[in-house]
Image (spheres, grey):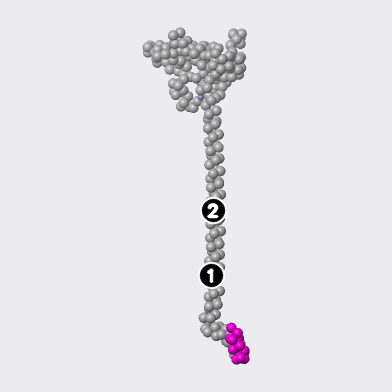
């Protein structure tokens, strides 16, 4: 038993999705790995047609292999969207051979593509967990994270720009207020000056008097001289 087992280039082992079949020896591209076998079910027989399990391998419209039997070690082979093996179906012989389509190294999990029908019925609803799909999912998550960061950075840039805009606006408003203040001050000063003159004729007359004084005090001749010079 042990010698038979050691002759085989595979073993059943833990896979990310449960159990799987793993290469224990190098398997060359194109070589037969294992046969997928079990009782043949005839769709024309009601009893056969009523059988339902995950290991049914449809050969054609009439014949299906029921691979759920314990001896069918090939049933451990998991599906992969980018597999290293294929199911070579020979409907006339009612035989299925799992064959390597790539060079497989010891330790590699052996996979084949279960086909569209199986994928739609069993894998799509729960999400395919094959290496290729996991990689795709990982990439998508990384892209989503990058996009989130990009949007965050964009929002931050926008907020910064908006803050700068508000700051500039506030500065402009402050300047405008200062200008108004300055104008008001000038007006006030003017008003104060005017106010002095409005405070009765005292200011005006006082200035007039000051201006008039030299004339009064000056000798009449001097005044006429300066007028003549002008
Ligand atoms: Zn997949």
> Magenta residues, as a range?
219-230
Q: Is residue 118 left or right of residue 203?
A: left
Residue sitting at 53 percent across and 24 percent down?
130
- Tag count in the figure? 2
The prevailing secondary structure element of the residues shown in magenta is: helix
Q: Are marks 2 and 1 in contact (CB under 8 Å)?
A: no
- Circle 2 is placed at which residue position? 165
The answer to whether one can see residue 77 in this image is no
Write down the quadrant of residue 41 in the picture.
top left
Please say whether residue 126 is visible from this viewpoint.
yes
Q: Earlier in the sequence, mark 2 or mark 1?
A: 2
Q: Could you tell me residue 7's position as x and y percent?
A: 60, 10
Please rate how many residues cluster around mark 1, counting C-alpha atoms within 10 Å: few if below 14, some from 14 to 19, many from 20: few
Q: Nearer the viewer, residue 179 or 38?
A: 179
How many residues crowd mark 2 within 10 Å: few (<14), some (14–19), many (20+)?
A: few
Residue for badge 1: 184
């Amino acid at each position: 038993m042990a010698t038979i087992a050691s002759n085989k280039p595979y073993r059943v082992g833990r896979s990310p999705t449960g159990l799987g079949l793993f290469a224990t020896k190098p398997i060359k591209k194109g070589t037969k790995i294992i046969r997928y076998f079990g009782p043949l079910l005839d769709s024309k027989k009601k009893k056969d047609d009523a059988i339902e399990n995950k290991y049914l391998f449809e050969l054609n419209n009439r014949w299906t292999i029921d691979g759920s039997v314990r001896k069918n070690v090939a049933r451990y082979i998991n599906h992969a969207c980018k597999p290293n093996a294929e199911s070579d179906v020979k409907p006339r012989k009612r035989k299925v051979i799992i064959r390597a389509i790539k060079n497989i190294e010891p330790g590699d999990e052996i996979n084949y593509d279960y086909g569209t029908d199986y994928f739609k019925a069993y894998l799509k609803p729960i999400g395919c967990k094959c290496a290729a799909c996991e990689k795709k999912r990982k990439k998508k998550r990384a892209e989503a994270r990058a996009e989130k960061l990009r949007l965050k950075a964009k929002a931050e840039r926008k907020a910064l720009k908006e803050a700068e805009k508000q700051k500039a606006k506030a500065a402009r408003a402050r300047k405008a207020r200062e200008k108004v203040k300055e104008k008001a001050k000038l007006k006030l000063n003017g008003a104060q000056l005017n106010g002095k003159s409005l405070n009765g004729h005292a200011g005006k007359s006082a200035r007039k008097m000051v201006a008039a004084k030299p004339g009064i005090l000056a000798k009449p001749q001097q005044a006429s001289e300066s007028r003549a010079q002008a």
